[in-house]
Amino acid sequence: MNSATISGFTSRLPLPRRAQQWFDAVPHPPVAVEVSEAHVAAVRWPQHAVEPLAPGLVAPSPVELNLTDSRSVSDALRKVLNRMGSHGPDVALLVPDQVVRVFLLHFDTLPRRTEDAVPLLRWRLKKSVPFDVEDTVVSYAVQPGPPSGPAGVDVLTAVARQRVVRQYEEVVEACSLKPGVVLSSTLATLPFFDDDRATLLARMTGRTLTTVIVRGPSLCVYRCSEMAADAAALAPQALLDEVYPAVAYYQDTWNENVHAICLAGFQERFEDFRRAIDSELSVNATRLTPSAVLGESLSGVARATVDRHLDALVGWARNRGA
C-alpha cells in the first residue's frame, strides 16, 4: 500500500487492503478486545476468554449511545483480562457492525492528501448516513475495482459517529488499556478469506446480518441489515432475501459468479441455512470455524466457545498474532 493510501487511515478505524495483508498498514496490538451485544471477549494468541453480558447493557446503534451501563461492561472486561494474564496496554478494539457504516464509493479522481480527501468523502456520505457527517470518524482505502468497470478510483470507506465510538473506547480505557485501533467485527473476520475468487460471508450477530463479498484485494459488496429474528428463529428464506441482491449485484458488476459461500453465527441452525443456499444458489455453503486456526489442543467446550463467539477476534489475530 502506497504512502498516500496509508495516510488515509485514521488510527482508530482501519480498513483492509489484501486478505493476506489487510492489517499490515495499521497498528497491530497483540491483544484484541471485542465488545458485542452478548459478551465481552479478548484474544492474545492463542489465549482467549469470554464473559457474557446481561441483556440490554449494549444496544448497538450507529446513532444513539450504545452502552446503558459502561461500568458493568468495564467490569466484565476486567474479568476477561484477569483470565488472560499479563498483557501490555495497547489493544485492538472490535465493535458491533451497526456502529460502523461501510460504503463502496467511486470517484473520477481522489485527492492524495488525507486532509483533502476526507472532506470530499464526508460530502458524498452526507445523505447516506443518519447523523451529522462532521461528527464522525472517517477512514478509507483505495482498492481495485471491477476489470470492466469505469475509469477512476474505487474507495472503501468506513464512517462512525464520534460519540458512539468514544463510549467503547472509554470502556477499555477504564481498564488501563489504550485502544489504538477500532474496527467493526465483521471487517475483522475478513483475513479468513484470501482466495482470488469471490467468497460471500453471511454473518449473524444477534439479529444483525452482515453480508460481504470479497475477491482478492477487493471488498466488493457490504450489506448490514437488522433481521426480524436471531438465527435460532430466523426463516432460511429471510437469509436468501438478503443474499440474493448481493449476489446479483456482484454478478452484474464483476461479470462472474460467487465461487464460495461461508456462514457464521448460525450455530445449531447451520444445516437449515446451508440446505437453503445449496438449493437456491447451487453453492455448497461452509461453516466458518475459527477454532481450527487455534489448533487441535482445544477441548470440546473451548472449541465450541471459540466457534460461537470469537470469529472476529481470531480473524484479527490470524495475520499477526501467530
Image (cartoon, rainbow, N blue to C red):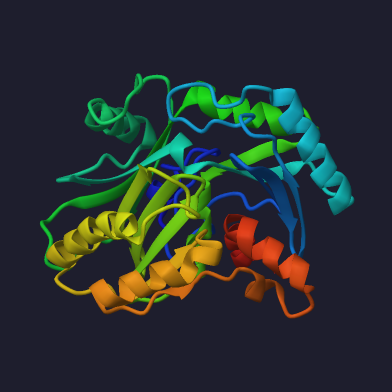
Residue at image location 35% in from the left, 64% down from the top: 214
In the picture, the quarter occupied by the C terminus is bottom right
Q: Position of residue 94 (x, y in %)?
A: 59, 45
Q: Nearer the viewer, residue 189 or 229?
A: 229
Q: Residue at x 32, y 77 (%)?
A: 278
Quadrant housing residue 202: bottom left
Of the 4 image quadrants, the one containing the N terminus is bottom left
Q: Is residue 166 above or below residue 293?
A: above
Question: In the rendered image of this protein, does residue 216 appear above or below residue 227?
Answer: below
Task: Report the side of 306 relative to 199 (left or right).
Answer: right
Q: Position of residue 279 (x, y in %)?
A: 28, 76
Residue 138, can we see it? yes
Q: Quadrant of residue 291?
A: bottom right
Above or below, 140 relative to 203: above
Q: What residue appears at the point 12 percent right and 56 percent down from the top-left corner?
A: 151
| Quarter of image, res 69 | top right
Front-lying residue, 235 or 112: 235
The residue closer to the viewer here, 152 or 238, is 238
Left or right of residue 24, residue 293 in this image: right
Q: Is residue 193 visible?
A: no
Q: Residue at x 50, y 40 (%)?
A: 13
Q: Nearer the viewer, residue 297 or 274?
A: 274
